[in-house]
């Protein structure tokens, strides 16, 4: 069984390690280095930060951020999800997404976005399994490590908020 609990500051060294794995993969983020805790803490919503654990080892994490400070977008968030390389394909990502969907709806979010590199089919498939649908692309949006990158924008609409 996958244990999921709220993310706390003491988790950050393990979270940073997993984040660095995503950076090294080259198809998870455009960041070139993981942020320090203070920046991470300011960026992500305190009520929607979770880690997954196996035998007290952090195996993955998920957080939400607002997409805009504008009042009209107050119910739109973006998820960020990372799973440790040694624990992929074990249902951890799905469990974390399902947890954050429930939490987001409790906080009034009607739309959850995921921006995924188009060369990350496993992440695209995972989000589809969790009810996300593709709503667009941003072609050649970023130049990373000598390569133009395209992202897929996926959305999960709430079944209870904003309908």
Image (cartoon, rainbow, N blue to C red):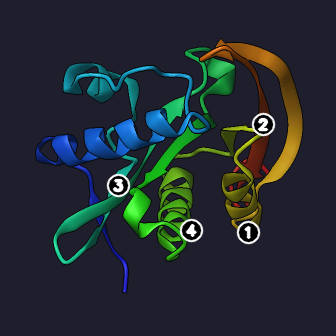
Question: Which residue is depicted at the point 37% across and 79% down?
Answer: 2
Name the mark nearer the viewer: 4 or 3: 4
Indicate whether 12 appears above or below 127: above
Label 4 to label 2, Cα distance in Å? Answer: 18 Å
Q: Which mark is residue 153?
A: 2
Label 1 to label 2, Cα distance in Å? Answer: 15 Å
Label 4 to label 1, Cα distance in Å? Answer: 8 Å
Decide which of tag 4 and tag 3 comes sooner along the chain.
3
Which one is in front, 76 or 14? Answer: 14
Name the mark nearer the viewer: 3 or 1: 1
SS class, disc 2? strand
Residue behind mark 1: 129
SS class, disc 3? strand
Which one is in front, 85 or 82? Answer: 85
SS class, disc 1? helix
Residue behind mark 3: 50
Residues marked 4 and 1 touching at CB (< 8 Å): yes
150 displayed left or right of 23: right
Mark 4, residues whose alpha carbon is within 10 Å: few (<14), some, or many (≥20)? some
Mark 1, residues whose alpha carbon is within 10 Å: few (<14), some, or many (≥20)? few
Percent coordinates x, y for residue 5 in the rendering: 28, 64
Q: Which mark is residue 17?
A: none
Decide which of tag 4 and tag 2 comes sooner along the chain.
4
Question: Which residue is depicted at the point 38% across and 58% down?
Answer: 60
SS class, disc 4? helix
Label 3 to label 2, Cα distance in Å? Answer: 22 Å
Residues marked 4 and 3 touching at CB (< 8 Å): no
């Amino acid at each position: 069984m996958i244990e999921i609990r709220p993310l706390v500051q003491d988790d950050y060294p393990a979270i940073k390690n997993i984040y660095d794995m995503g950076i090294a993969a080259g198809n998870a983020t455009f960041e070139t280095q993981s942020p320090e805790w203070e920046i991470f803490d300011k960026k992500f919503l305190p009520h929607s930060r979770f880690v997954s654990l196996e035998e007290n080892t952090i195996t993955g994490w998920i957080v939400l951020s607002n997409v805009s400070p504008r009042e009209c977008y107050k119910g739109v968030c973006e998820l960020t999800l990372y799973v440790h390389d040694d624990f992929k394909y074990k249902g951890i990502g799905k469990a974390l997404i399902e947890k954050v969907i429930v939490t987001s709806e409790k906080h009034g979010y009607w739309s959850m976005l995921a921006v995924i590199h188009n060369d990350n089919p496993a992440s695209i498939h995972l989000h589809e399994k969790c009810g996300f649908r593709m709503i667009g692309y941003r072609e050649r949006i970023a130049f990373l490590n000598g390569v133009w990158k395209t992202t897929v924008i996926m959305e999960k609409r709430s079944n209870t908020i904003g309908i």
